[in-house]
Amino acid sequence: MNFSNTAAEVTSNLIVAGDIKVGRSLHKTVILGIFAGMLIGAGAMASSVAMYDIANAGLARLVAGLVFPIGFVMMVLFGGELFTGACLMIMGLLKGKYSLISMVIVLITVFISNLIGGIILAILVAYSGQFKLGDGAMGAFTIKLALSKANISFESAFISGILCNFFVCFGVVMAGLSKDISGKVLASFLPIMTFVTGGFEHCVANMFYMPAGIFASSNSKFAESAMTKYGITAEKLATLNWQNFFLKNELPVTLGNIVGGMLFIGVALFILYGREE
């Protein structure tokens, strides 16, 4: 029995998957998008808990890289709609399966749904008491992590976004190479571990990281702990807000994710295998 697909078969399957996304009802797309946002957020949440008290940056990233993919794997097996993976719809567009406007509508719907899911999880985590771990050290770390994303330059965020979705879409493709669950788990785990360990920017993961940081910073104890432990000034702390979340992080990171997924993976796969269908 053959337990794997060829790259050409995966490309064909992804083109069909794009057609299915276009034809799916709005409410199903929204629900699947919310689930994906929450599951990716779950991976982000778990990795933060695992790394918050690790001083060595390299070791902390490695630990995060080992934990974060859990959320992506759950999303792949469940079948959620993830914006970064949906960028591979470019192949169906190039194949003439649907129009540009149809693809854009799906991408916008999935993006907004992922955002809702990420914020819902961030709210639940904020009120769960998790930020109290280590006498507030978890809340302080959540603030520090979000601040690093709120103050990244446009160029760095954009290029980091490209690198991120190169690996994320590779994870989608590699999951499609296997026909059994264990194979999908391992194949999708490796590229996601690579992007997280590399510290690259994922727009959907940031839909949890940054709202969680904003919620944590509204607590004076966590904010004071972050300022004391990490030398964060009050002026710097003020940059952790919804405007910077959307304009300084989500905007450039999302654009980078689009380029990384569509151009570096989608268009490349279409040129290699899609035209031969």
Image (cartoon, rainbow, N blue to C red):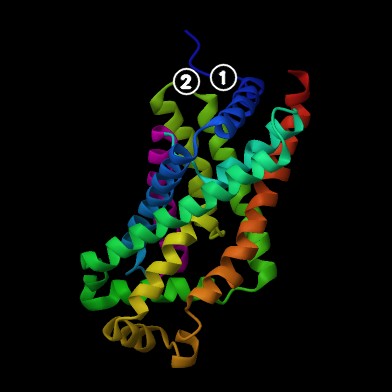
72 in magenta: yes
Q: Residues within 10 Å of mark 2 (few under 14, many from 20)?
A: few
Closest to the observer, 144 or 194: 144
| Residue that badge 2 annotates | 179
| Residue that badge 1 annotates | 5
> Which residue is painted at 52% across and 71% down in the image?
245
| Residue type, mark 2 in image | Lys
> Which residue is painted at 39% across and 61% down in the image?
119
- Disc 1 to disc 2, C-alpha distance: 7 Å
Label 2: which secondary element = loop
Q: Can residue 168 be spotted in the picture? A: no
Q: Quadrant of residue 215?
A: bottom left
Q: Which numbered tag is attached to residue 68? A: none
| Residue type, mark 1 in image | Asn
Please determine whether, in this image, residue 50 is positioned above or below residue 25. Answer: below
List the single residue furthest toward the bottom: 234
How many marks do you count on the picture?
Answer: 2
Q: Quadrant of residue 51?
A: bottom left
Q: Earlier in the sequence, mark 1 or mark 2?
A: 1
Span of residues in magenta: 55-78
Mark 1 and 2 residues: CB-CB less than 8 Å, in contact?
Answer: yes
Q: Residues within 10 Å of mark 1 (few under 14, many from 20)?
A: some
* Horizontal side of residue 130 vs 179, given as left or right: left
